[in-house]
Amino acid sequence: MRRKDLLQLALVQEQEHAVILLGPDARVVSWLPGATKTFGYEAEEMLGETIERIFTAEDLRRGDAEWELRTARSYGSAEDDRWQVRKDGIRIWVSGIMTALRDADGNLAGYLKVARDRTDLKSHIETLQHRLEQASHAEGEKRIVLGTLAHELRGPLGPLMNAAQVIRMTATAAPQIQSALEIIERQVRFIDKLVEDLLETTRVTVGKVSLHYETVELGSIVDRAIETCSAALKERDQNVVVLIPASLSIQADAMRLQQVLVNLISNSSKFSPQGNRLWVKATVDGEELVLRVEDQGKGVPSELLPRIFELFTQAAPQAESEAKGLGLGLALVKAIVEMHGGTVQARSEGAGKGTEIIVRLPLRPAEPGSRGLAEHET
């Protein structure tokens, strides 16, 4: 079969695409079966007519039909995605292209219009957008409720702690009471920390926190973060090995960067066995600081990795004595890192195989001679 005949068969039998040929006066000279299926008009109804019939009234008022032809004449083709109208009045979402056809001398010979009904795709996109808007609204409402709850919870904690201290001063001779007081004080401090984390996470994620940039030395930030975590590290007999470029300075909010490290170190400590080592490492990759906090702890199940930085996400405890928490720390880390224009990700080979958290932050070029590696163990 000749190529010309094969092409003719293809044009006649193609049903998914509307193929329309227009003369140089922009009137229909060929209305193929795919166009009938898409727009509902038979060929005899459209021959000699313009394709304005398939444009919506608002598009015609804007001159979009003429704009499409003019663009094709000027640039060779015009692509568009728009609502168009079938013969029965039903609107369909059409993705199409208008191509100007020219003879060997460059004179305009006509136009080729190829279009496809993608109403199904448009509906799917709109459904997903609606769901995203609903989820975003629900997330915003949740954060408002959580922030309000945290403020309400904070109020009673001060009086509770004060009352416990008063009882302690007046009950020194009663060992049972002293033991009960220790439990009360410990639990009040625990709740106070949860409330503070919740408030901080809410403030950061709703944009109520601003960054105060300054030139900070990473080493001092790491040392201060480890000092903040020293009580928990000592209780669990854990050491932190620090491997960072010497005198590495970056532009960041020092307090917030320390907050990131405290959360990461605390998290690694909490989910690592007694007596284990943790690592804080840093390298320079182009214009970025790459900061890693590693442990050999319980690891993260593969199904949890994509959600590990979401609010309230935490692996199930492996023992009854293991602290559950609220899963706020990593959510706060992600929010602060993203405020700095950075990214954070978690890696783990699975349960029991440790975790590596990788933070990438924009980096001011290090000072001369700062590429040497400083190593110490605390």
Image (spheres, helix red, strand yellow):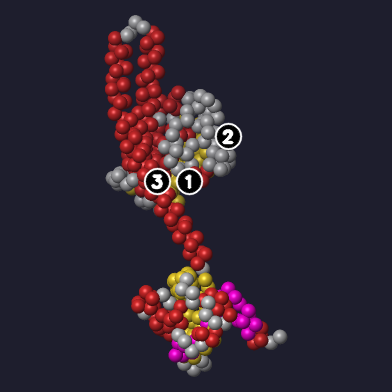
State the residue in front, 243 or 288: 288
Q: Pick whichever, 107 or 88, lies toward us.
A: 88
Instruction: Report the quarter where the C terminus lies.
Output: top left
Q: CA distance from mark 2 to mark 1?
A: 19 Å
Secondary structure beneath label 2? loop
Amino acid found under the numbered disc labelled 2: Gly
N-terminal label among 1 and 3: 3
Q: Position of residue 98 (x, y in %)?
A: 48, 80
| Residue 337 seen anywhere in this rendered image of the structure | no
**Magenta-tinted stretch:** 8-28
Secondary structure beneath label 3? helix
What residue is pinned by disc 2? 352
Residue at disc 1, secondary structure? strand
- Give the quadrant of residue 246: top left
The residue identified by callout 1 is 345
| Residue 71 rendering spot, x and y as whole percentages | 41, 81
N-terminal label among 2 and 1: 1
Lateral position of residue 27 relative to residue 36, left or right: left
Q: Residue 193, image x and y in percent?
A: 37, 30
Was residue 318 drawn as part of the magenta stretch in this picture? no
- CB of mark 1 within 8 Å of CB of mark 3? no
Tag shown at residue 139 = 3
Q: Is residue 116 left or right of residue 62?
A: right
Most distant residue in the front direction: 88
Decide which of tag 3 and tag 2 comes sooner along the chain: 3
Mark 2 and mark 1 residues within 8 Å of each other at the beta carbon? no
The answer to whether residue 316 is above or below residue 34 is above
Residue shown at the point (69%, 87%) measured from the top left: 2
